[in-house]
């Protein structure tokens, strides 16, 4: 559990996703599910992103989050909609989220990492935790719409333990889809057939 001021947690808040994680590159991040009171920090985080990072996330210039967006992004049910924040020395440095697609076991994922902290292994660490949280709620597949120019995000998916498939959907957008269900080991499969 992370050392932080304790506020009343919303119903369904998954404390088990509060972690201190060291990325393969050695960066230590504190990760926790987002809370409604994170809205002002999320607004400041977004405003500090470069225009390029905002474009990669939203596919258009989007310098500020509206009050409605802040409400949606910080008020999640932790089951069909989950957002995780990563902090370094209490500074918000990344946000990752999934939203379940209606009446399915699939969810759309999205990530944004503060410019100075890109290429530190933060997005891959958050992908793992999102998959863990999603699997608990019957989600077995992640999908993402990513700009073809967003080689960093495409790299996160292709270098993960998952096996993504990609298709072009027009307008320079790549649709990525992959199962988050762990593969069975060959030895376990052999044992079951014997």
Image (cartoon, grey):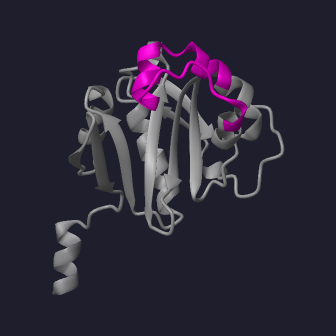
Tell me the quarter of the picture where residue 65 sits. top right
* Residue situated in front as seen by the camera: 63 or 171: 171
Residue 62 part of the magenta-drawn span? yes
Looking at the figure, which quarter contains the N terminus? Answer: top right
Q: Is residue 188 left or right of residue 117?
A: left
Q: Main secondary structure of the magenta part?
A: helix
Image spot of residue 82 (x, y percent): 58, 49
Q: Which residue occupies the extreme front position in the image?
A: 171
Q: Is residue 155 magenta?
A: no
Of 157 and 160, nearer the camera is: 157
Range drawn in magenta = 43-68
176 sits to left or right of 8: left
Residue with the most extreme bottom position: 194
Name the residue rendered at 25%, 49% in the picture.
164
Q: Residue at image x 27%, y 40%?
A: 174
- At which x and y percent is residue 6? 81, 38
Quadrant, the C terminus: bottom left
Task: Give the left or right position of residue 92, taking residue 60 as reference.
Answer: right
For the point 66% across and 18% down, the residue is 44
Residue 11 at x, y percent in the picture: 76, 57
90 shown above or below 67: above
Q: Is residue 8 visible?
A: yes
**Residue drawn at x 56%, y 18% as measured from the top left:** 63
């Amino acid at each position: 559990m992370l050392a932080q001021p304790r506020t009343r947690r919303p119903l369904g808040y998954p404390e088990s996703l509060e972690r201190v994680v060291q990325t393969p590159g050695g960066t230590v991040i504190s990760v926790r599910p987002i809370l409604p009171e994170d809205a002002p920090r999320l607004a400041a985080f977004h405003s500090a992103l470069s225009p390029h990072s905002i474009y990669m996330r939203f596919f258009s210039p989007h310098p500020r989050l509206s009050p409605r967006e802040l409400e949606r992004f910080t008020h999640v049910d932790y089951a069909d909609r989950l957002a995780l924040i990563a902090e370094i020395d209490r500074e918000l440095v990344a946000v990752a989220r999934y939203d379940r697609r209606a009446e399915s076991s699939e969810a759309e994922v999205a990530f944004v990492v503060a410019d100075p902290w890109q290429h530190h292994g933060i997005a891959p660490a958050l992908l793992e935790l999102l998959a863990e949280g999603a699997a608990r709620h019957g989600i077995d597949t992640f999908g993402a719409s990513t700009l073809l120019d967003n080689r960093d995000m495409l790299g996160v998916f292709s270098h993960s333990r998952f096996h993504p498939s990609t298709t072009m959907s027009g307008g320079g957008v790549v649709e990525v889809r992959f199962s988050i269900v762990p593969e069975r080991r060959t030895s376990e499969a052999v044992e079951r057939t014997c």
